[in-house]
Image (cartoon, helix red, strand yellow):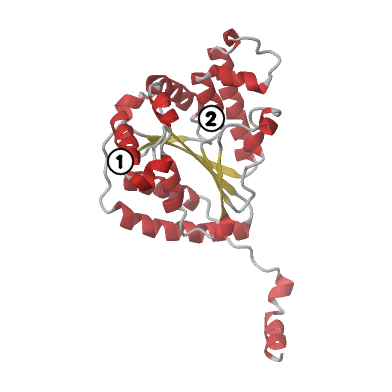
């Protein structure tokens, strides 16, 4: 399988591919079982947590990917957070606060459906949103320049560096959807009655800003893909292929850590036969 980690400057238009993995759904089923087993062992060991970050344009398939990739993982072992428009409480804290409190504890997989990168993406396309944070140094749109967002990206890099140092494995996936395929998926939401609820007129407004979003994505991907917290650019026009790539990448990363279940202390081990006898006599 190709490596999707960003290792050099990228251009998202040139990164778009129509890649299709044969029998992706069948292969995904096998991967899911292995991920589930490894997560059980990771939970028992209690040394690491995993943070899976999913970003992508509207209709890129984040929700269905989460459902399909983590379908076999024990419910206690995976936590999913979907970040929407910040609440009044969230806006009263710093821009990373709501993400920090949603981090997975050791032993679990956390999935961020949209992530802390919204703070250098949506707010960069719509800088007026930042005014809701009541930052003392931000007095006008002129203050929300490239330097402002690049400073935020550097703070995000430090945030992730801190998490990794404390046992969080970070995997960041950008679902790289083509504009033509987004059009097809939006039309599907309109043409199929049971899918109508997924459609919002706001989707079309954001679609008109496609080029702006692509520019912002390219900048953040290149500035925040680090060896300890890499971005993976995943072709997303074929949903089964995208799910397979994410699952395979996740499994390969988990296998590197050689998770082990803790061994019983010698005193308990020496009494196992005694404990069995007590139970059998009940």
Dot label at residue 191: 1
Between 271 and 125, the one lying in front of the other is 125
Residue under label 2: 117
Left or right: 220 with respect to 161? Answer: left
User: What residue is at 68 percent from the left and 75 percent from the top?
Assistant: 269
Element carrying mark 2: helix
x and y, in percent, of residue 264 in the image = 67, 69
Between 87 and 220, the one lying in front of the other is 87
x and y, in percent, of residue 22 in the image = 25, 50
Quadrant including the N terminus: top left
Q: Which residue is most to the front?
A: 193
Between 137 and 259, the one lying in front of the other is 137
x and y, in percent, of residue 210 in the image = 38, 23
Q: Are marks 2 and 1 in contact (CB under 8 Å)?
A: no
User: What residue is at 53 percent from the left and 51 percent from the top?
Assistant: 257
Instruction: Classify 71 as above or below 10.
Output: below
Q: Which residue is most to the bottom?
A: 281
Left or right: 96 with respect to 217? Answer: right
Left or right: 9 with respect to 224? Answer: left
Query: In terms of image quadrants, where is residue 149?
Result: top right
Q: CA distance from mark 2 to mark 1?
A: 32 Å
Left or right: 234 with respect to 123? Answer: left
């Amino acid at each position: 399988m190709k490596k999707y980690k960003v290792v050099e400057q990228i251009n998202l238009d040139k990164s778009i591919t129509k890649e299709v993995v044969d029998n992706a759904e069948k292969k995904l089923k096998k991967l899911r079982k292995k991920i589930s087993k490894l997560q059980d062992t990771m939970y028992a060991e209690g040394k690491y947590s995993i943070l899976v970050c999913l970003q992508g344009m509207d209709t890129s398939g984040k929700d269905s990917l989460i459902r399909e990739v983590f379908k076999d993982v024990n419910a206690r072992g995976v936590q999913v957070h979907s970040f929407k428009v910040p609440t009044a409480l969230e806006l009263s804290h710093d821009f990373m606060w709501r993400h920090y409190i949603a981090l997975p504890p050791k032993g679990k997989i956390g999935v961020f459906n949209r992530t802390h990168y919204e703070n250098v993406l949506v707010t960069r396309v719509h800088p007026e949103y930042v005014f809701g944070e009541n930052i003392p140094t931000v007095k006008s749109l002129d203050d929300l320049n490239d330097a402002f967002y690049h400073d935020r990206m550097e703070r995000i890099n430090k945030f992730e560096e801190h998490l990794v140092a404390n046992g969080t494995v970070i995997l960041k996936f950008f679902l790289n959807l083509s504009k033509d395929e987004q059009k097809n998926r939006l039309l599907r939401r309109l043409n199929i009655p049971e899918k109508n609820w997924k459609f919002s007129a706001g989707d079309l407004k954001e679609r008109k800003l496609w080029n702006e979003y692509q520019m912002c994505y390219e900048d953040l991907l290149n500035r925040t893909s680090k060896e300890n917290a890499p971005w993976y650019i995943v072709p997303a026009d074929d949903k089964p292929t995208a799910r397979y790539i994410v699952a395979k990448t996740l499994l390969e990363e988990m296998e590197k850590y050689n998770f082990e279940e803790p061994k019983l202390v010698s005193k308990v081990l020496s009494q196992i036969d005694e404990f069995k006898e007590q139970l059998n006599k009940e």
